[in-house]
Amino acid sequence: MGKEKEKKQELIKNPKGTRDWAGEDVDLLEDILAQISRVFRRHGGKKLDTPVFEREEVLKGKYGEDSKLIYDLKDQGGELLSLRYDLTVPFARWLAMNANIKNYKRFAISKVYRRDQPAIAKGRMREFYQCDIDFAGASDPMIADSEVIAIIVEVFESLEWSGRYTIKLNDRRILDGLFEVCGVPEEKIRMISSAVDKLDKSPWDEVKKEMVETKGLDEAVADKIQTYVTRKGGKDLLEELQKDEALMNNAKAKKGIDEMEILMDYLSAWGALDKISFDLSLARGLDYYTGIIYEVVTEGSAPVIANGSDVAQEVQKKGKKEKKVLDEDEDRSNDPSVGIGSVAAGGRYDHLVERFRSNADLPCVGVSFGVDRIFSITKARIAKGETFSYISSNAPDVYVMAFGGGGFDGMAKQRIEVTKVLLDAGLKVEFTYKKKPKPQVQFKNAEQAGSPFAVILGEDEQAKGEVRVKEMGLPEGHPEKEGVLVKITDLAAEVTRRVEMKKLTTNTGRIAVS
Amino acid sequence: MGKEKEKKQELIKNPKGTRDWAGEDVDLLEDILAQISRVFRRHGGKKLDTPVFEREEVLKGKYGEDSKLIYDLKDQGGELLSLRYDLTVPFARWLAMNANIKNYKRFAISKVYRRDQPAIAKGRMREFYQCDIDFAGASDPMIADSEVIAIIVEVFESLEWSGRYTIKLNDRRILDGLFEVCGVPEEKIRMISSAVDKLDKSPWDEVKKEMVETKGLDEAVADKIQTYVTRKGGKDLLEELQKDEALMNNAKAKKGIDEMEILMDYLSAWGALDKISFDLSLARGLDYYTGIIYEVVTEGSAPVIANGSDVAQEVQKKGKKEKKVLDEDEDRSNDPSVGIGSVAAGGRYDHLVERFRSNADLPCVGVSFGVDRIFSITKARIAKGETFSYISSNAPDVYVMAFGGGGFDGMAKQRIEVTKVLLDAGLKVEFTYKKKPKPQVQFKNAEQAGSPFAVILGEDEQAKGEVRVKEMGLPEGHPEKEGVLVKITDLAAEVTRRVEMKKLTTNTGRIAVS
């Protein structure tokens, strides 16, 4: 292979850590996003769609150590720009620009960018989707907060994840108060909090080691912390804490605990109380949280995101290729060492907008859904044979063909006319772009497209104002195996009726149909 | 104002040439995009969603002089990347990566990036939406091409632009043949073609001047070109050309004219023939077209895209502010000097994929819709009082309130319970995030949100298992002015019934409702 050829090969790649969404994957992704945005809209969410890049200063100093992961644009003259890192900071920038806005329920569905080392198996990409809803503006304690948690529940119920997820819940004020009560020095609170956050992946002994050896915490203090942060539950845990005098004497902890009681009361009204786990080990990484925090965890397979090339190939060679990818998926799901991260997370952050406009006074609470992970887990469940009622088929409803003997001209114009009639009835229609296509070619194309019906034109039938409607794949001996003749004037109604009937009687889901 | 303060003010801007899509604008945009993608899907379109950036080499050498408008990312180590300039090159890159794909109907809806001097009034932004469908793979002459034109017609009909648009149509082969026949030297054909392309903005004399004086064309040749390129029509023009012996003796022109006849025949089958204007002055800028080319023009107001700040303000202070923006819009629409560009354009390009993979043999034909312009014109029509059946209301269906006398606790928990019942029925529901909100505050919030109904809880009604359902804004003296009492068990059904009834009897369109 010459140098020249090699170069050409190298060109045709998508960038590292990105993927092309195509075929059944992009359809499933769209169905998931549609479910989520329907929930957001029901709760009064209004969409905000900001530019993919922001002025460099807008992002600067917002992400701590992770700022190194921000993609900058080249200085080509004019403003210095960076790709957005999340959807929260652009929302805060937009709120700051619009001082007249006193409250807003905004949702956003967009890709975000992190110049991280990609880890496909862990679902860590450089370009990935986020799907956020945030309520900005005043709320009496825990009312807006409880609605965000109700939205999390509705999203996962509408995605048919019932019984498969838990919302881990804590409050920064309880956590900070608890550290004070245990005797953590003020300046070590944030780093001890980070250590505690690792308890979902590491055993206590390791976390303690980090606290004592790396972070220089007194061992007795660490042991005291253990008595708290290894506890989780529901109302029972709340009642225990309310009896804990030391904790209730700490102003921060008391405030957090009092409001947790209010929150649980509201959550019972939302029907969401049984979905949460009050978990004192939940700390969350980001600095800006000021109250309630939460993270949604699920059991299931590890997310596997194929690279762009694989995904695209799946579109054309389903079957073997796809099977392979999904088998790997299954293998990993049985491997307890592969932890899947959270599928949604968020909390209250009351002072972020003030970073852009002093005295903005726009307290916020919100949640971000990790759509790529939700997609991967849903895809793995489909591969195991599960069906989902919200997944729509994108195969054509009907394929238009024409057959004829010697001297037959292919009836291209008539195929177009019939296609147009069926399209106007709202059906999805395809036909073969050949002037005189062979019957086998047309049938093969119809099958590959996954069309459940064919409309077949012929010169004899045409003369009588009729066409043949045939259901694809009927067994030999079926009375309608060869199709039925339909008056051209009745065609749209007849095909619509059959397509709807078929949808009612077939298993739901694109995968089942195709 | 101190230096510090000034700096903070400067921070809160969106980047030049971009906008934040918010409020009614983003809802209208989404409704337009939904209509377009519905048409794409009916015709078998499959979505492709590629990364926002590509490897630098993928874009290099694809856009001629306009390559200088490409945004590059900073070299932070690893691959050199650039933001996509259009959706066509990423599609070709994807096709080249997937050698097994022999044909594909792909659509894409995404933002693209051009580091151009922004011109808001002309709708020229640095970040803007494109909405493309392209058919890759073999087609007998003009079959796939005719379906793309049928899609253009369906899109504009579904957007309710009937009678307001014309599809200008030409063929690169006719144009090139015609230049040869007129005696344009081979090496001047592309530059003379570019000059002809300006005939939609400039009179013939100016274009001639450019040809003769700037491009050194013989004046007699220019005069001969004039006899062709000032002609437009339909089948009549085609028949004239078919009688033109000089033209029909040129192989390229003959091929183009023969296929134009086939195309018109198919277009009559699609019911699209009366929407086109065969226009010999249409040349199109891009080099890569190899056959049919088209551009959709419309009459109407010039596109006005407000800057991010204005748009956001509209959300909160509708009325005066919006009125102002739209009046300006109207002014411009009466100014004939403000030309609006095309709202869609495309053509056949048979050799682009080969730029990435030799011998790829993937002929393509497609169209790109200029969604920002379509949005601006639609918005201006709405401001003039037009309604569109596809525009959906995003206001809440119902607002949940509670009223009570002294010692009243605000019934926050009960409001949540009722909200949940209504949400579960699929309704859009909001309530006030106050523990004890005043009646006036709740009514004001409901009105601002544009809710047509209120559900009002009270302690007395609660005791009897009842709530009050009230239609907002009924006139004094209306028998239901104070609302009607409904059993809590019947509430979801009763509100659903009223909301649906209201939708049937109200003018369509979000604007009319809010």
Image (cartoon, coloured by chain):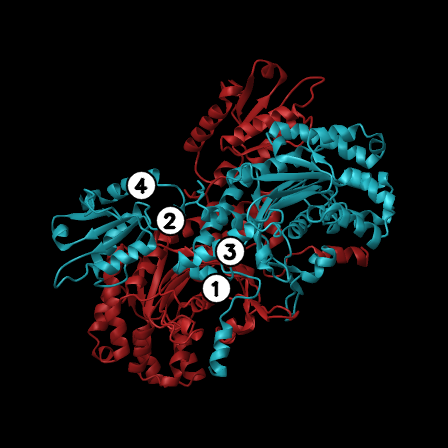
Chain colours: A red, B cyan
Tag 3: Cα neighbours inside 10 Å, few (<14), some, or many (≥20)?
Answer: few
Instruction: Identify the chain of the residue marked 4, using the numbered disc in the image.
Output: B
Quick check: do tags 4 and 1 share a chain? yes
Q: Which residue is mark 2?
A: A158
* Viewer-side label of 2, 4: 4
Residue on which disc 4 sits: B502
Q: Chain of mark 1?
A: B
Name the amino acid, label 4. Answer: Lys
For residue B64, what is the image quadrant? bottom right
Identified by mark 2, the residue type is Ser
Q: CA distance from mark 3 to mark 1?
A: 17 Å
Q: Which residue is mark 1?
A: B309
Circles 3 and 1, Cβ within 8 Å, touching? The answer is no
Q: Quick one: label 4 or label 1, which is nearer the N terminus?
A: 1
| Chain identity of mark 2 | A
Q: Classify 10 Å Cα crowding around label 1: few (below 14), some (14-19), many (20 and above).
A: some
Are circles 1 and 2 on residues that touch, CB within 8 Å?
A: no
The span from disc 3 to disc 2 (Cα, nearest Å) is 44 Å
Query: Which residue corresponds to mark 3?
Result: B328
Does any portion of residue B267 appear in the rendered image? Answer: yes
Chain on which label 3 sits: B
Disc number placed over residue B257 in the picture, else none: none
Instruction: Mark 3 and mark 2 in contact? Answer it, CB < 8 Å.
Output: no
Q: Position of residue B104 (x, y in %)?
A: 63, 41
Whole-percent x, y for residue A6 in the image = 76, 57
From this viewpoint, is residue A28 visible? no
Please report contact status of discs 2 and 4: CB closer than 8 Å, yes or no: no
Marks 4 and 1, how far apart at CA: 34 Å
Tell me the element at label 4: helix
